[in-house]
Structure formats: C-alpha cells, structure tokens
Image: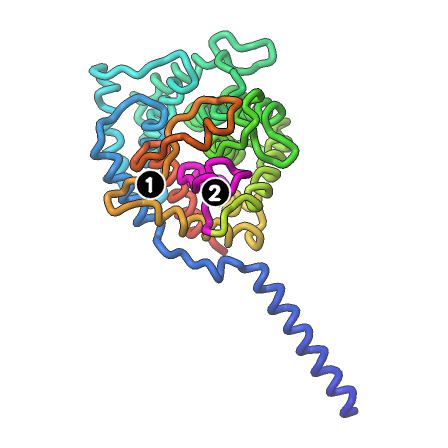
C-alpha cells in the first residue's frame, strides 16, 4: 500500500508540473504586463495631432479617423468634438478635399465615422460621394475603378467601403470591400503569408503589409461567416498573422523590410500589426495563448517610440513601389509623421478594446 501511495503522489506531482508548464505556455502575457497604458499614449498622440493644421491628405485623415475610434473606445467626447471641429471648414466649403484617386477618396472615412458616432446626416453626403466614386465605372471583374494592385490600396478602398457599409447599412459596400481585399490577397500575398508592395516590387515593405493587415481587421468584423468572401479573407488574415509572429524583433518591433532584421525598426507598421493582431485576439479569431504575449510585447515597445509631445519616432515617409531593395532601406525616417500618428492611435484603440474584453 505504501508503494502504491508513493506512486500516486509521484503521478500527481508530475501531472501538476505538466499542467503548470502548459499553463505557462498558454499565458505568455503574464510575463508581458502593459508598461504604458494605451489610453495615456493615445491621448498624447491626439493632442499632438490636434495642434497641427487639419488637411485632406490620406495620412492625416487616417489619423483623424484613429482619433475618433480612440475617443469612442475610451468614451472621451472632448476628443471627438475636436475632430469634428477640424472637419468644419470642409463641411462649410472653405476647404476642399481632393477626389479621383484611392489616396484622395479615403478622406471619406472621416465623415463616415463622425456620422456613425453622432447620427448627424450632414456628414453622410461627402462620404457616400467618395465611396461611390471608387466604383463609378466598375471594372468587369467588379473591382474599383482605381484598382492598381498596390498593397496600400487594400486599406484605401477596403476601409472606405467598410465605413460606407457601417453608415449606410447597404451590403453593396461590404461586398465591394471584401471582393477588393480577396482579389488583392490573391495577387500580392505570397506563400509565406506576407505581401509584396506591388507585383513588380517584390519586397515585404513593413507599412505596405500594415495597410493590408489593418484593412482585413476593418472588414472581417463586418462579414457574416456565410458571405462568400469570409472564408478566403479569414484564411489570408490568419496566414499573415501567423507569419508576422516569426518576423517580430526581439525588442517587440517589426522592421522596415520585414524579412531583413538589419533594416530599421519602424513604428507605423508595428502599430498597424498590433491593431490587426489585437483585434483578432479580441474577436476570437486568433488564440490568446499564442498571440497575446506578442501583442503586449509589441505595444510596450511601440509606446516607447512616442515622445513626451505625443509625436511618434522612426516613421518611414511616404514610399512609392520600386524594384530596388535600397529604395526601401534608405527611406527617410521622421518624427511626428502622420503615418505613425495614425498607426499608434489604431493600436491604442485595439489595445483598449482588448483590455476591456479580457476574459
């Protein structure tokens, strides 16, 4: 009997050890507590943004949209009011936005989000005009008039059409967004899960991949599982997220060229990946035990790139697609560039939502 009791004790101890080990693997986030709260970082970034002159360029508009969704996530009406005040000259006509290109038309995400939050119909016309303009003479394959298969366009078209759907509740816009994204995935996503900047620019540019990741994270929450685009888009998204885990640096950041660790750590792509990955964890598309620690590590690193004024450091400037690796490696890096401001606000928003919805 003593021998049996001893063996039982050994068995229980071994099972406890295994359970503890597995639990440790399932909760890597326990070793990665948030070092800087996303609400604190987001408020600083908004403050820096609101002090600048408001404009129509896509990187600014993405930042205003980021400020609005961040305000919604932390329930801060003052931030939302500031973004609406910045839009007033466009509404009254003293300032004009441009139209006729994906980088121009994405302006519509700003008024669409204001309409979604306020229900004020004065914001609808401009957004609808820009969303419809992308398809004024749709291609035979159903894609946008402005399709050019640059990976950036996944967000410029996908997000605008997604915001149109959220505001207008017409599935025409949702299917436009999903069809566009799936077509771009088929064209530009490689077997390793990452995206080329363009078919003839075969490089895994960080922010280009960030646009793709963010676009999928904007559209997928809206797609019902029965939609014909849901399965291929979710598959492409998960494939990309899994690939990104292997390209995250030891410091938590992702790099200007994702597969070149010698390239500089770049903050805008890091913010976009955190937004997409944190959204996936929050929605249950990605297993928490595999991704949460990586997301938290990325956020902690990214927060350190925001200075006291709220300006984001190490942001790659606007970048054309080229079949030249040096072109990407030598791109200037700026502090306070709106590509980075937008990405950090998106990431902060996703982190706030994730924190609120932790089991």
Q: Nearer the viewer, residue 293 or 95?
A: 293
351, above or below 332, in the image: below
Q: What's the colour scheme? A: rainbow
Residue lying at 30% horizontally and 37% vertically, measured from the top left: 335
Magenta-drawn stretch contains 264: yes
Q: Residues within 10 Å of mark 1 (few under 14, many from 20)?
A: many
Q: Position of residue 112 (x, y in %)?
A: 37, 26
- Does the rendering let one see residue 138? yes
User: What residue is disc 1 on?
Assistant: 313
Query: Magenta region: which residues?
Result: 251-277
Residue lying at 73% horizontally and 82% vertically, measured from the top left: 8
Q: Position of residue 239 (x, y in %)?
A: 61, 38
User: What residue is disc 2 on?
Assistant: 254
- Does the rendering let one see residue 218? no
Helix, strand, or loop for circle 2? loop
Looking at the image, residue 35 sits to the left or right of residue 244; the answer is left
149, above or below 30, in the image: above
Q: Nearer the viewer, residue 183 or 284?
A: 183
Q: Residues within 10 Å of mark 2 (few under 14, many from 20)?
A: many
Q: Which mark is residue 346?
A: none
Q: CA distance from mark 1 to mark 2?
A: 14 Å
Q: Are marks 1 and 2 in contact (CB under 8 Å)?
A: no
77, above or below 293, in the image: above
98, above or below 9, in the image: above
Residue lying at 48% horizontally and 61% vertically, measured from the top left: 31
Residue lying at 53% horizontally and 22% vertically, measured from the top left: 323
Looking at the image, residue 163 sits to the left or right of residue 143; the answer is left
Residue at the limit of the structure toward the top, as seen here: 137
Looking at the image, residue 173 sits to the left or right of residue 229; the answer is left
Q: Position of residue 1 (x, y in %)?
A: 79, 91
Magenta-drawn stretch contains 355: no
User: Does label 1 or label 2 sit earlier along the sequence?
Assistant: 2
């Amino acid at each position: 009997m003593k021998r049996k009791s001893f063996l039982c004790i050994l068995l229980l101890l071994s099972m406890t050890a295994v359970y503890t080990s597995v639990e440790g693997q399932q909760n890597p986030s326990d070793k990665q507590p948030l070092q800087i709260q996303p609400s604190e970082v987001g408020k600083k970034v908004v403050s820096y943004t609101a002090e600048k002159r408001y404009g129509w360029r896509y990187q600014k508009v993405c930042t205003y949209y980021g400020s609005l969704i961040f305000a919604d996530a932390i329930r801060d009406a003052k931030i939302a009011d500031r973004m609406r005040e910045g839009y007033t000259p466009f509404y009254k006509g003293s300032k004009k936005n441009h139209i006729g290109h994906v980088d121009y038309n994405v302006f519509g995400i700003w008024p669409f989000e204001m309409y979604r939050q306020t229900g004020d119909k004065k914001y609808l016309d401009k957004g609808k005009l820009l969303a419809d303009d992308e398809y004024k003479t749709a291609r035979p394959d159903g894609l946008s008039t402005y399709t050019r298969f640059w990976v950036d366009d996944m967000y410029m078209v996908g997000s605008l059409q997604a915001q149109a759907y959220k505001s207008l509740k017409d599935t025409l816009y949702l299917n436009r967004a999903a069809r566009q994204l799936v077509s771009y995935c088929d064209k530009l996503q490689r077997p390793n899960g990452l995206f080329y900047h363009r078919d003839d620019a075969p490089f895994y540019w960080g922010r280009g991949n960030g646009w793709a990741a963010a676009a999928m994270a904007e559209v997928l929450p809206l797609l019902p599982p029965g939609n014909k685009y849901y399965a291929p888009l979710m598959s492409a998204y998960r494939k990309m997220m899994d690939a990104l885990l292997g390209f995250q640096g030891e410091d938590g950041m992702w790099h200007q060229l994702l597969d070149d660790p010698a390239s500089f750590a770049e903050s805008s792509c890091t913010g976009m990946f955190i937004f997409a990955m944190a959204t996936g964890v929050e929605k249950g598309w990605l297993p928490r035990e595999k991704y949460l620690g990586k997301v938290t590590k990325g956020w902690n690193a990214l927060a350190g790139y925001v200075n006291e004024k709220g300006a984001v450091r190490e942001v790659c400037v606007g970048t054309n697609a080229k079949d030249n690796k040096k072109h990407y490696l030598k791109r200037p890096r700026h502090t306070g560039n709106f590509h980075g401001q937008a990405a950090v606000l998106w990431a902060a928003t996703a982190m706030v939502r994730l924190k609120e919805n932790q089991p």
